[in-house]
Image (tube, helix red, strand yellow):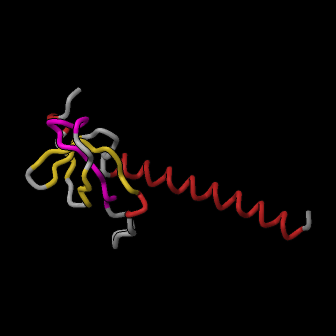
Amino acid sequence: MDYGKSVQQVLLRKIYKAEQDLLQLKLDYCRFVFGLTHRVRVACGDKTYVVRSGDVDTMKHSEDGGFTKPVITGAPAETPDSVQPVSLGVEWILEAKSSQPA
């Protein structure tokens, strides 16, 4: 194996590791800053949904130095497991803790 190929492999491993680390950091940011976790309840419009997933790739840098909310998908809270999830965009609000099931 030549030197160039070896350097390329090392750099690719470092890039993949950095991408994984960034993904995990964005997930942590969503959890601690937005309170967003899998199966948490959010309000969007006049309905309540149970979060199924979030797309951290949709998070953008905000003017205050943080990140914007991610686009999430959710299912209606009344029937969370029987309905295909729908995209809720970024116009969601975390439901108050007191109304979430224990």
Q: Determine the residue positioned at 26% across, 60% down.
A: 89
Residue 27 falls within the magenta-colored stretch: no
Q: Quadrant of the N terminus?
A: bottom right
Q: Determine the residue positioned at 81% across, 66% down.
A: 7
Where is residue 50? Give x, y as percent: 24, 41
Q: Determine the residue positioned at 16% across, 49% down.
A: 43
In this picture, residue 93 sits left or right of residue 4: left
Give the residue furthest to the bottom: 63
Where is residue 77? Give x, y as percent: 17, 39
Q: Quadrant of the C terminus?
A: top left
Where is residue 60? Give x, y as percent: 38, 68
In this picture, residue 28 sits left or right of residue 100: right
Where is residue 6? Give x, y as percent: 84, 63
User: What is the count of numbered marks?
Assistant: 0
Q: Determine the residue positioned at 43% across, 48% down.
A: 28
Residue 75 falls within the magenta-colored stretch: yes
In this picture, residue 43 sits left or right of residue 85: left
Give the residue furthest to the top: 102
Please tell me in which quadrant of the rendered image residue 87 appears: bottom left
The residue segment tinted magenta is: 69-82
Work out whether 36 lies above or below 7.
Answer: above
Please tell me in which quadrant of the rendered image residue 90 appears: bottom left
Please tell me in which quadrant of the rendered image residue 8 appears: bottom right
In this picture, residue 73 sits left or right of residue 46: right
